[in-house]
Image: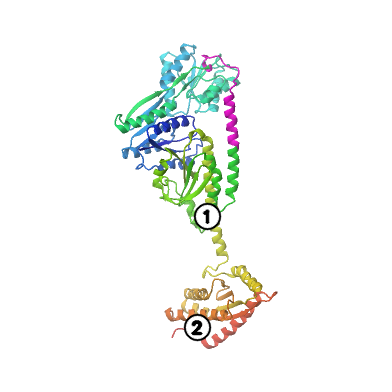
Amino acid sequence: MKTIALVSCDIDESYHNPFSQSFVDTCKELDFRVLWFQSLSGKFNDEIRDEGEMNIFNLINFDLIDALVIMTMTFKADDVAYALIKKAKEKNIPVISIDEDIEAAYSISLGYERALEEVIRHIITKHGARNIKFIGGDKGNDASDAREAVFCNVMKEYGLECGEDNIDYGYFWWSSAADAVQRHYDKFGSMPDAFVCANDSMAVGVCSKLNELGYKIPDDVIVTGIDGIPEGNTHIPSITTLMRDVSEAGRTAALRLSQIFSGELSPVGKETVDGTILYRESCGCEPVRLSIDDNKQKHDLYGQVELWNGFSDSIIQMSEAATGNYSFEETLDKITLFLKNVWTKECWLCICNDFISSANTLEDVFKSQNSYRTEGYSDVMGYVLHGIDDKKFDFLPPFKSEKMLPELDMIFKKYNNIMFLPLHFQKRAIGYIGFEFAFSERNYHILRSLVTNVSKVLENARIQSELKAVVGRLEDMYIHDSMTNLYNRRGFYQLAPQIYNKCISDGVGFMIVSIDLDNLKGINDTYGHHEGDNAIITVADALRSASNEYDINARFGGDEYITAGICVSESYAENFVTRVKEYLDNYNKNSGKPYLVEASCGLYSLVPATGKTIDEFIKAADERMYDQKSVHRKHTGYCRRRI
C-alpha cells in the first residue's frame, strides 16, 4: 500500500475542497493512503507567523512516504516548496506539482491561458470591444504575469492598444480592483469597453464600482473574470469566467501516481487539465436577471451563520475555561471542549516535550523566551491528547515525532487519510494536530479559527505555567535563608503558628530550641569569612539531621537559629538537642578543619496554654541558651582550635 504526502497552503481557498476531496477519493479507490500537511498561511501577511505555519512541513518523514503531491499554486514561499521537492528527489520519491511547471516533477496545470485567449477574442469578435483594460493580481506574481502576457498577445493579434493605460493591478482582491476602476475614471473621465480581470473576486469588485459610478453591465461596460468561484454565479450580473476543473485535476494527480508507480508513466512530464468557459450575463451572452430566488443558497447561508454562532460560543467557552487553569494538563483537558468542533472520527493533539520549560527563575524565563523551538519538532512529543468521535478524550504516552502519529499503521487500517495542521504562536513551535479528514463536514474557515485559538490557549497556558513556577520559587526564596536554605524569620513566623495551634488543640507539648553558633567572630577573624560561612552551614545541617518532618528550622540572624516542633514523646526535645550535639561532634572528628564547630542550645518545652505566645517560648529558650553560652565562653575562651 502506497502512502502519499499531499502538501498545500491557504486552507480556505476555494479550490482546496474540490481538489483534495477528488484526490483523496481517487486514492482510496487505488488503495493509496494520504497524509495531508497543510499550512494555514496566506491570509495574515505576517512573516513571523508564516514562519511558524510553514514549520508543519518539517514534520514530513520522507522515509515513510512513497510520493509527494504539492499544490504549488498555493505556496507564496517558493523556497519552501522547492526545498520539499528537493528532499523528495533526494529520496527518489516521485513528485506531482499542481498548477506550476517544475522541471524535476510531473506537472499538472489548471489550464487558463487558452481559455483566457478565447474569452478576450470572444468580447472582441462577438461583442465588439476595442478599448479593453486588464486588471491583474500582484505585480510580479507568476500567475498574474502569465495572464497579463496572454492579454497583451491577444490585443496585439487584433492590432489593439496594450500599453500602461490598458493595464492596472487589483492584487487578487475585490476592493483593490474597485480602486483600479476609480483610478481609470479619475484619469480619463470615462470607461473602457471592457474590463478583463485576473480572477472572479476582482471582477465582482469592478462590477460594484461601475454600479456605484452609474454604469450598467454589460450595456455600458463588459466585465470578465477567471476561476469560477460560487459568488461569480450568484452575483448580478453573473460573471463570464473560466471554470477551472480542480476536481478533475485532483483525480488526474492520483491516477498519474498509479501510472508512475507501475512504470507506465515517466515521473517527469507535463499535462493540462482544461476548464470550461462560462459565457454569462456580464459579457452580454445571457440576459441580466433582475433578482435571484435561490432558496438553497439562502438555506446554506443561514446554515453557515448558525454554524459560526455555535462555533463562537465554543471559543468563548473554551477560552474562559482554559484561562482559569494554571496547570498545563488542566488546560489540555479544557481544550477537549473546543476539539469537538473538529467534526472528526479521531484526532490527535501532539505537543513538543520541550514546549513547557522547567523555568524556576526569571533568568530561566528569559532564556526560555530567547531559545524556543522555531524549526522542526522535538524528538519526542510529550503530550498527546487523543479524541474519538468528539466525545471520548484521553492522554496517550509520548511517542517519537518521526512516526508523526502513534501507531500510524493501525490508524491507516481505519482511515485512508489524515490531515496535519501546525500549532504555533508566531515562530514558536507548539506541536501539531492530526485528524481523520471528513470532507462532507469540513468548514475550512472554522478549522483555521479553531487551530489558531487552540494555539493561543496553549501559549497562554505555557506562560502561566512558567510564571507559576517562578512565583513559587520567589515565594520560596522569600521565606528561606539563601545561605543555609533553612527558613528565615518570615518563614518561621508563617509556619510555626500552625504547629503551635495544633499543640494547643491536641494538648501536646510544644518545643522551642534556641541555638547559637559559638565563636563565629573568632572563626571569621582567624580563618576568614568563608570558613565562618562553613560553620554556619554546618550548624544548619545539624538541625536538619536532628529534625523530623514536623520540625521547623530557621536561621534568625548571623549565628542565631530557632527550631520549633511538636514533642511527639516526653524525651523528644532533649533527644533533639542530643542529636544536634552528636552531629557536630562527628563533624569535628572528620572535618579536618583547624577549628571546632560548636553551638549553645537552650530548650523550652511545654503544653501551651491558650493566651501564651510563641515569642514567650522563644524568650524562655533564649535565656537558657545564653546561660549555656556563658558557660562555654568561660571554658573555651576566644576560639577553640583543634589540638
The magenta stretch spans residue 306: yes
Q: How many marks?
A: 2
Q: Is residue 12 above or below residue 232?
A: below
Alpha-carbon distance for marks 2 and 1? 48 Å
Residue depth check, mark 2 versus mark 1: number of the one nearer the observer: 1
Name the spot of residue 413 as percent of width and height, x first. Answer: 41, 41
At mark 2, the secondary structure is loop
Q: Which residue is mark 1?
A: 466
- Looking at the rendered image, the quarter that the C terminus falls into is bottom left
- Give neighbour class at mark 2: few <14, some 14-19, many 20+ (Cα, 10 Å): some
- Toward which corner of the image does residue 24 lie, by quadrant? top left
Q: Which residues are magenta?
A: 281-309
**Looking at the image, which residue sits at the far left?**
263
Q: Earlier in the sequence, mark 2 or mark 1?
A: 1
Amino acid residing under circle 1:
Glu
Q: Which residue is mark 2?
A: 639
Q: Position of residue 379 (x, y in %)?
A: 40, 50
User: In this image, 314 relative to 252: left or right?
Assistant: right
